[in-house]
Amino acid sequence: MANDFINTGKRIEWAGFDCDVWLGSYVKSGAPALALMERGTGEDVVVASVNLSVLPPTGCVWIKDWTENEGMLAALVAAGVVEDTGMRRETGFCEAALCRLLVPERREP
């Protein structure tokens, strides 16, 4: 799914888990990917982003806010991870939210 994950330093409560927010990129498209991993164990909890055929603009990410991710957009906004641009893209029967990343895409070495 994604590679080169970095810990953004942001924390979020999701589905009863205390999570760190990690940022990487989708392997084939190179689009940004956000994942929540359980704090302490590093176990995957959920992927917050979605990889669409349309790349997001630089500094932005598509957020999945349906089915098991319902409420994800509000949680990420509240945690200061993303800013909702208000733009949406249809993905079948749902819409992905285009969000501006508020965390650095790459850390300096």
Image (tube, rainbow, N blue to C red):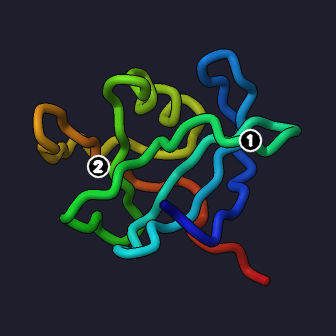
Taking depth in this image into account, of 106 and 38 the one nearest to the observer is 38
Q: Secondary structure at mark 1?
A: loop
Q: Residue at x 18, y 43 (%)?
A: 88
Residue 61, x across and y down, in percent: 38, 56
Taking depth in this image into account, of 28 and 100 the one nearest to the observer is 28
Q: Residues within 10 Å of mark 1 (few under 14, many from 20)?
A: few
Q: Amino acid at mark 2?
A: Leu
Q: Amino acid at mark 1?
A: Glu
For the image shown, how many numbered marks are present on the structure? 2
Q: Residues within 10 Å of mark 2 (few under 14, many from 20)?
A: many
Q: Say above or below: 103 vs 57.
A: above
Q: Say above or below: 71 vs 30.
A: above
> Which residue is farthest top?
16
Q: Which numbered disc flags the more N-terminal residue, 2 or 1? A: 1
Residue 6, x across and y down, in percent: 69, 63
Tell me the tag on residue 98: 2
Quarter of the image holding residue 46? Answer: top right
Q: Nearer the viewer, mark 2 or mark 1?
A: 1
Q: Say above or below: 61 vs 49.
A: below
Residue 8, x across and y down, in percent: 68, 55
Gap in angstroms between the C-alphas marked 2 and 1: 26 Å
Q: Quadrant of the C terminus?
A: bottom right
Q: Is residue 78 left or right of residue 19?
A: left
Q: Residue at x 73, y 80 (%)?
A: 108
Q: Residue at x 48, y 58 (%)?
A: 33
Quarter of the image holding residue 20? Answer: top right
Residue 52, x across and y down, in percent: 25, 58
